[in-house]
Amino acid sequence: MSPTSASSSAQAARKALAERLRNLRRDAQLNGRELSARCGWHPAKTSRIQDAKVAPSEADIRTWCAACGAEDQVADLVAASRAVESMYVEWKRLKSAGLRSLQDSYATLYEQTELFRFYTSDVIPGVLQTPAYVRAIMSRSAGAGRSEEDLERAIEAKMERANVIRRGTHRFLFLLEESVLRYRLGDAEAMAGQLGHLLSVISLPRVSLGVIPLNVSRTLWPVESFRIYDEARVQMELVTAAVNVTTPSEVHEYLKTFAELQRCAVYGPHARSLITTAIAALG
């Protein structure tokens, strides 16, 4: 079974934190009004926190635990709260510093990761993208109030990050749905260059590139694109947000999903054939 959607995972984490706080109140045999009185805030705030309608601050968590006589739970709950916050990061805030800064924000994570697993059902993975392909993708953001200079600096940063596949001891496992080879982002020349680049990286010693054919008999349907960094973090990019998943049980589900998708893929000459066929279809 596939993982839940990324946004659902983030919301589920918020609800889980809220439920833990609710259970602390119940264990202390306090109702909502009694807890609110001890905390020194309006009962409506307690309700909103318990219903996961608002996220509690770290100060709120400490006050809540003190009111319940559960100070020993503060560290764990604060850590859980920080994990929830890191799961869902608004693109608007990330992009406010510019497209170049957004690309630079990934640098440390990429350098520290030993094994990358990429599954894509929409676009070519970032570290395999060519400048022309990146420009076609990023032009939409540049046109939304971003300068051409910012766009060029972002492309430069992304190309610098892409060099990670050629240096160090990093290993890469790529899985692409065949449809990704057919989605035309940019003109035919840009797409031909991008697909040709895929052919050149297939032979790299630390790269495994599999393509899941359109006509393959499969037990798992295409899911949202995701990246797994070692076995510690999963990341997805939505229209409005970047989602980070670090909960071990959820990371494990994505690892299982990746393994199942791998069994649907073809490699080597078969993958090359699908890529060359896509190039020929450009006309």
Image: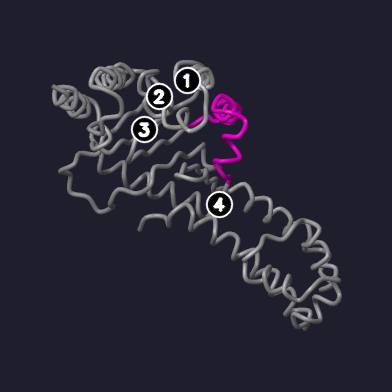
The amino acid type, in three-letter code, at marker 1 is Ile
Amino acid type at mark 2? Val
Q: Position of residue 52 (x, y in %)?
A: 62, 66
Which residue does the image show at 25% across and 43% down from the upper left?
A: 264
Q: CA separation, marks 1 and 4?
A: 33 Å
Q: Is residue 171 left or right of residue 283?
A: right
Looking at the rendered structure, which numbered label has been put on residue 174? 3
| Image quadrant containing the C terminus | top left
Amino acid on which the number 3 mark rests in the picture: Phe
**Which residue, given by chain and number where applicable, does mark 1 sit on?**
155
Residue contact at pointers 2 and 1, CB within 8 angstroms: yes
Position of residue 132 relative to residue 90, above or below, is above
Disc 3 packing (10 Å; few <14; some 14–19; many ≥20): many
- Select label 2 or label 3 by which is in front: 2
Q: Which residue is mark 2?
A: 134
Q: Nearer the viewer, mark 1 or mark 4?
A: 1
Q: Say which of 156 and 121 sits in front.
A: 156
Which residue is at a point 75% across and 83% down the rendered structure image? 31
C-alpha distance separating marks 2 and 1 = 7 Å
Give the spatial CA distance, label 4 vs label 3: 22 Å
- The reply to whether the magenta stretch includes residue 60 is no
Q: CA distance from mark 3 to mark 1?
A: 21 Å
Neighbour tally class for label 1: few under 14, some 14-19, many 20 plus, Cα within 10 Å: many
The answer to the question of whether label 4 and label 2 lie on touching residues, with beta carbons closer than 8 A, is no
Instruction: Give SS at disc 1.
Output: helix
- Residue at image location 38% in from the left, 44% down from the top: 258
| Quarter containing the N terminus | bottom left
- The residue type indicated by label 4 comes to Pro
Where disc 2 sits, the SS reads: helix
Position in image of residue 66 (x %, y %)? 85, 68
**In the rendered structure, which disc, 4 or 3, sits on the residue that comes first in sequence?**
3
Q: Which residue bears the numbered disc 4? A: 248
